[in-house]
Structure formats: C-alpha cells, structure tokens
Amino acid sequence: MYKKISLIIMALILITAMACSPRERPNPQGEQPNEDLPKDRLAKSKKEAVEENINGYNLEDDLRISDIIKEPEEHRVLLISEKEKMQVLERVKPKKINTVLEEYKSDLPNEITEVVQYTQYEISFDYFLITAENGAKILEKPKPNSTLVAQGEELEKVSLLQRVEGEEINGSKIWYRVAFKNGNGIKEGYISSTDGTPRSFRFDKMQNAINELKQQLAEGELHFISNYKNENGAPPSKGDAAVDEHGYRVYHSAPAYQEADENSDFRYIPDGMLVRILNETGDYYHIYSPTFDGNYYVPKRYIDPEKKLDKLKDVIVVDRSQQNQAAFEVVDNGLNLISYTLSTTGIKGDFSFVTTLGSYKAIVKRDRFEYLKSGTQEIAGYAPFAIRFTGGAYIHGVPVKYEEKDGEKVDPGVIEYLHTIGTFPRSSMCVRNYTSHAEFLYNWMDVEGGAFIIIE
C-alpha cells in the first residue's frame, strides 16, 4: 500500500531532499541562480479575496497520500511530546554496541517561557523525518540484522533521542536512537541515518530573529511596503523574469533604488516587508530595510506613512529549512511560546514561488480566500483561516478544492489534515498549516501588533 505514496512523491524527494538537507548551507538571502529565473505564468485576479493558485504541487496528490496513510493508530509510529521524550531519555542507557555522539536535550532559551495554548498535534523539539522510499526499519540495536521494533513509513516522523555510531549500513555508520508511540505505549529503537533527515525547532534562531526586530522597533516605528496585486503600480521590469537575482518576485513588489532616480540600479522589495523611513527626497522615501540590511529609495506611492508597526505584540516565525514554525507573544521580560507545529512553505516551480525570507507586517485576516486554477480565471478552491503577510501569501489551513454538482461549485467542507505538512515545500508562496492550528492563529493574533518572520 505504501508503494503508492512513493510513486506520488518520489520525484519531489529527489528534487527537494538536497535543498532541505542539514548538510547544505542555505543562502541567507534566498538567492536563485541567474540562469534559471522563472517566468510568471500564474493567472491573476483583481477581485477581493481571490488569489493566484496557492499549490505548488497538485492538491489531489497531497490528499491521496493522506488517505493512504489513514490506518488505525496502533499500526503506525507517531511522534511523542517533548515531555514524553525527555522521560524516555532519562531512563535509556547507552548500549555497548554503539558510541553516543549527541543527545537531543534541546532546552528553550532562557528568554522564552513555554505557555503553549495549542496541543492538538504533539511533537518533540527534535525529530526525524523518514524519507526512504520503502519506509524505515526501527531496530532494537544500531546494526542491520537487529530485531525489528517497528516499521516507519515514508514521511512519518519519530522523536530524536540520540545520534550514535553503530554498524555500517548503506555506506554510513550513523544511526539515530528514536522514540515513538506505537500501539498502546511508547517504544524506542534505532533508525539508520540513510533513511531520512533530522529536523528540529530552532528556538534560539527564532528568538534571535525576533530580538533583531525588537531592536529595530526600539530605534523607532517601522512602516511596510504596500503593493498588493500591484495596486499602487507595477514596478519596472528586468526582462521577463518573475523574480530578481535574489529570488524576490516582481509582482506585488516595489522598486528599491540605489539612488533617488528611476534610472539607477534597483532590486525588488516585496509587499508587506518592514522598512524604516529615514527621510524624504522629492518623490522618494529614503528607507532602511532590516531584511536586506541596506538603504534604498522607494517611490512614495508604495509606502503609506499612516500604516505602521510601532509596538510588537504577536510574532509568527516560519523556518523554511525545517518546515516548522512557532508563535510567540512579546512580553517585557522576553517571549511567551504560544504554539509550535509543522508547516509547509512554497516551492520554486513553473507555476509556483518560494515563501520569501524576511520580516513582514501581519496585514489582514480573512476567514477564507479563494484561489484560481493555474492558467485560468476559474476559481479552483479556497483556503480557510488566513492571515496575509506579503503579496498573495498567507498562513492558512489546508486548501479545499470545490466539487462540481449539476454545473455548480459545491464546498465539500474544511479539511483538517494533510500528511505532507512538515515534510518538504509544496505550496506556492503561502505557509500551509493544519486547519485547526490556522484557526487558532486566526483567533489569537493581533494583526495591528503582529509580524511574520521567515527564516532559513
């Protein structure tokens, strides 16, 4: 049965596994090679709450994978909570056959207080994503011929306890000791490093990103670029590429000039990105971009001086490389961790775009927005519980494709879960969440004092 999953996502794994590997050092500005800049083929609409196609891959594939994986929980390996993981770690002892290289005891930074309000999908701070086409054997010892404890299937996740050295398999001696729910209890065993990739919630990096934004606000209020659907004018183009050499889209963006002159060199700065107005020069605002760490000149029509962020209250940080996220409340003595969960970001493709790095203003909430079918003006479906933060990019629940009955579009109802969430980038621009978590964020976030930070 699980062979069907492999057929659906094998190409995705081959394309994106290296991009998500912890061995690869990500580019801090999300740059894309100049020779491979995509064209903008997405159909667009000027209608309110109607967006471009938000799916990087066919949504039916995600739904099919999720349907295949729907087995009784006693037959699956399931993640455990951080508390449960630490309890397991306290009682496990090293086995003589292996050398422990690292223990996964990820504590929250001192400035972060855990006051989690969303607990529907429990997950440990460190976990292992199974990417092997035929799944992975979880064994009693870190050796190929050891007793089988459980079978983990492709795209399932287990909690990390230790990284160890054991007997060689598939050219590697590195194994991971993992814990998981299976049947009526919590079990532990070993999984080969060749069967997947370790992931973690990098709370220290998230905290640093928020502290940098807090420091910027301590120096004065921030404004943001406003050019949703090019409402304030299409920026000048550089050929027919849809993005610039740094990976930022032309559509929804403003030109950020090196000089107060439209003939000077420029780059694109996207809708929603936070900036500081330094002064005015004729028809331009001289601005500083914390994300780009540089000064630029932006035509005044792209910044509304009345709309600003002067006090930071709620922040959502999305980690592209780990495909996870966390929500924080900013308090006087640090940060309150409100939720942490898995997510799916955008992927570069012929009809899709990455979720771009940077600091953005939370702009607007929508209980749902509709999206177009690629290449047409036909409404394909909708996404529930959405908060827009740049261009047509939102954080939202699982997309829903309309059904057709008697020539009319029919809403089949919201979908809670996709098994592909938290695996590899599969959306276009947007950040996909479990629907219950998107609803939680929709009700929790104060848009006026809210911000999004996309890290890698």
Image (tube, rainbow, N blue to C red):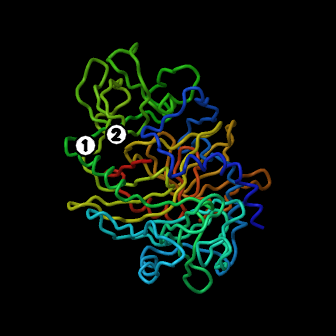
- x, y (%) of residue 42? 63, 35
Provide the residue designation for mark 1.
216
Q: Is residue 63 visible?
A: yes
Amino acid on which the number 2 mark rests in the picture: Leu
Residue 39 falls in which quadrant of the image?
A: top right
Left/right of residue 453 with respect to residue 34 in the rendered view: left
Q: Secondary structure at mark 1?
A: helix
Q: Which residue occupies the extreme right position in the image? A: 406
- x, y (%) of residue 75? 68, 78
Amino acid on which the number 1 mark rests in the picture: Gln
Provide the residue designation for mark 2.
274
**Where is the N terminus found, in terms of image quarters?**
bottom right
Q: Which residue occupies the extreme bottom position in the image? A: 184
Rendered residue at 46%/81% (across/down):
93
Label 1, residues with CA under 10 Å away: few <14, some 14-19, many ≥20: some
Q: CA distance from mark 2 to mark 1?
A: 10 Å
Label 2, residues with CA under 10 Å away: few <14, some 14-19, many ≥20: many
* In the image, residue 414 above or below residue 97: above
Q: Secondary structure at mark 2?
A: strand
Foreground mark, 2 or 1, reads: 1
